[in-house]
Amino acid sequence: MKPNSILGRYLSRQMLMSFLAVLLMIIGIIMMFDVIELLRRTADRPDVGFGFVIKMALVKMPRSFELVFPFVMMIAAMVTFWKVSRSNEFVIMRAAGVSIWGFLTPVLTIVFVVGMLNITVINPISSYMYEVYETMNYRFKTKNPDAVLFSNKGLWIREAGENGNILVLEAKSVRQEDDVLLLRKVSLLELSENSRLLKRVEAYAAELSNDKVEMKDVKIFEPGKPTKTLNDFDYNTSLTIERIKENFIDPEAISFWNLPETIEFYEKSGFSVVRHKMRYLSLWASPFLLMAMVLVAAVFSLRGNNRRGGVMYMIVGGITTGFVVYFMSQIIYAFGVNNYIPILLAVWAPTLIITMVATSLLLHLEGN
């Protein structure tokens, strides 16, 4: 069945309507529990108003929803298939010569489109909102309404320098004012490719702006040379405020479009990018995972004879399978993050396993 045929458009519309209905229901439940939890946390904080609580719940919601997105799609598919089976439309389609794969093609197509929209359009918005939530949560914990989320342990970051050298920048305290990053008690180490110290620069204060670090009250130490004392010392850098912020936030708070550049930068700087790569590849795999969840839903809810009942079987089977898939994917993901298995295997294994098992069961049902 072609997705753009009349029957294909009908099934796609039914799937989309079910998805939106389940989406609104899940969002409402997540929002309710988040508000209750935040109200509990702010019960002894008279300085925090209800508006702040609602805003925190709203900006956290996209991240919470992303965790349950595959299950939302599976539930929506189960609802769609159950409606079609209950009204005997599925039986009529099969009697008209439509195979189960022809029936699923329009549904899988619209699910794939939704998945691509999620990673290319929704994900950047979700990532930004998650970063806002992290900042608001940090301000709530520190009781500072102007606090900017970096690190309460200062700053320690490195980048690739010229001629293969490595520059390591350390600061005891970090604060942002507008587009300038203020650093205190700064140390700059210049290392060779063999990690041999070539130069150490220490400064009481520094500012990072416009791809340049401006140091004040500087002392320069070089092996075999006398110590130099300068009022000012500048050096060009590829670091930016956004880049440094990304070093202290989860990969989930970085947009799909910004992840490749971030990965390239940290690889050149010598940082581990396993979590960032896992995140990026997982986003690419997510539309196919959604399609696999639709196949799982078809196994439990596509029935040729609805008079046999089995609604409880569909609900229990679907929920149990969903939890098994979730825990299996989390375990395999953890193996990948810790380099126990290759990253590609960790990302794609759950999707491939689910797809193969569901396809085998559907082929068995098709044969019967």
Image (tube, rainbow, N blue to C red):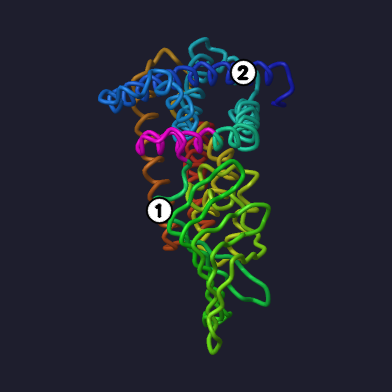
Residue 227, position in %: x, y?
53, 80
Q: Is residue 177 left or right of residue 72?
A: right
Residue beneath disc 2: 93
- Of residues 83 and 271, which is closer to you in this image? 271
Residue sticking out furthest to the top: 87
Residue 97's place in the image compared with 247, above or below, is: above
> What span is in magenta?
129-147
Name the kind of residue labelled 1 in the image: Ala
- Of residues 230 and 53, which is closer to you in this image? 230
Could you tell me what secondary structure mostly forms the magenta stretch? helix
Residue sticking out furthest to the left: 44
Q: Residue at x 64, y 33 (%)?
A: 121
Question: Does residue 334 belong to the magenta stretch?
Answer: no
Q: Earlier in the sequence, mark 1 or mark 2?
A: 2
Classify the position of the N terminus by image quarter: top right
Residue 78, position in %: x, y?
47, 23
Q: Which mark is residue 173?
A: none
- Res 310 visible: no
Residue 165's place in the image compared with 247, above or below, is: below
Q: Residues within 10 Å of mark 2 (few under 14, many from 20)?
A: some
Q: Residues within 10 Å of mark 1 (few under 14, many from 20)?
A: some
Residue beneath disc 1: 334
- Res 63 visible: yes
Give the structural element (helix, strand or loop) at label 1.
Answer: helix
Q: Residue at x 56, y 81 (%)?
A: 198
Mark 1 vs mark 2, CA separation in Å: 43 Å
Residue 329's place in the image compared with 81, above or below, is: below
